[in-house]
Every structure is written in C-alpha cells, then in structure tokens.
Image (tube, rainbow, N blue to C red):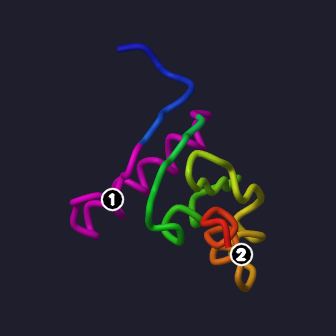
Amino acid sequence: MSEPRLLLIDELSLGLAPRVVDALIERLVELNKAGMSLLLIEQFVHRALGISDRVYMLSKGRVVFEGTPAEATRAGAVEEAYLLGAGA
C-alpha cells in the first residue's frame, strides 16, 4: 500500500462506540503529526474541533463558516453558521 498524503474521512463516529472513536481519533492525531493531512467530515462538531487546525461548516452545499477551532467555539459561532445556512 502506498503512503498517502491526504486521508478523507466521512462521519468517523457514526455507529461506533465512544471508546472506539477515541482510539481512532488518537490514531488520526498520530498520522497528522507524522505529516499526513486529514479532511474530516463529522456531525459532532465539538469532537472534530479538538483535532482540527481549520474548520469549515457547510449548509446546503455552501461554506457558511471558515476559521480556526478557537473562532468556531466562540459564543454562538456554530449557531450563527447554522442560522446563516438555513436562510434566517
């Protein structure tokens, strides 16, 4: 198997026990530290924020938020991005 530079992951935690997800996240952090880039699509925002360098939130196929995890966790950022995407 080749050594990829980018790993795309869609819904890492879907249907998995929290303990399994934690183990997978630990491995992803190791891979990232070794130089691999990761693109993670995850519905549990706060779990993804803990291992992210950049955050993009999508709604209806559009980017409604782009920033750092710190910017995303400021009061109301997630809710604001959701409402912008919903057309409110």
User: Dot 2: what SS?
Assistant: helix
Residue marked by disc 2: 77
Residue type, mark 2 in image: Ala
Q: CA distance from mark 1 to mark 2?
A: 22 Å
Q: Position of residue 52 (x, y in %)?
A: 62, 56
Q: Residues within 10 Å of mark 2 (few under 14, many from 20)?
A: some
User: Dot 1: what SS?
Assistant: loop
Residue marked by disc 1: 13
What segment carries the magenta color? Answer: 10-36
* Residue 50 drawn above or below residue 76: above
Compared across the picture, whether 35 is left or right of 40 comes to right
* Residue 51 drawn above or below residue 63: below
Q: Position of residue 69 (x, y in %)?
A: 70, 65
Q: In terms of image quadrants, where is residue 49?
A: bottom right
Task: Single out the residue that lies furthest toward the bottom.
Answer: 75
Task: Say which of 35 and 78 sits in front.
Answer: 78
Mark whose residue sits in front, 1 or 2: 2
Q: Position of residue 45 (x, y in %)?
A: 52, 67
The residue located at (70%, 57%) in the rendering is 64
* Residue 48 drawn above or below residue 58: below
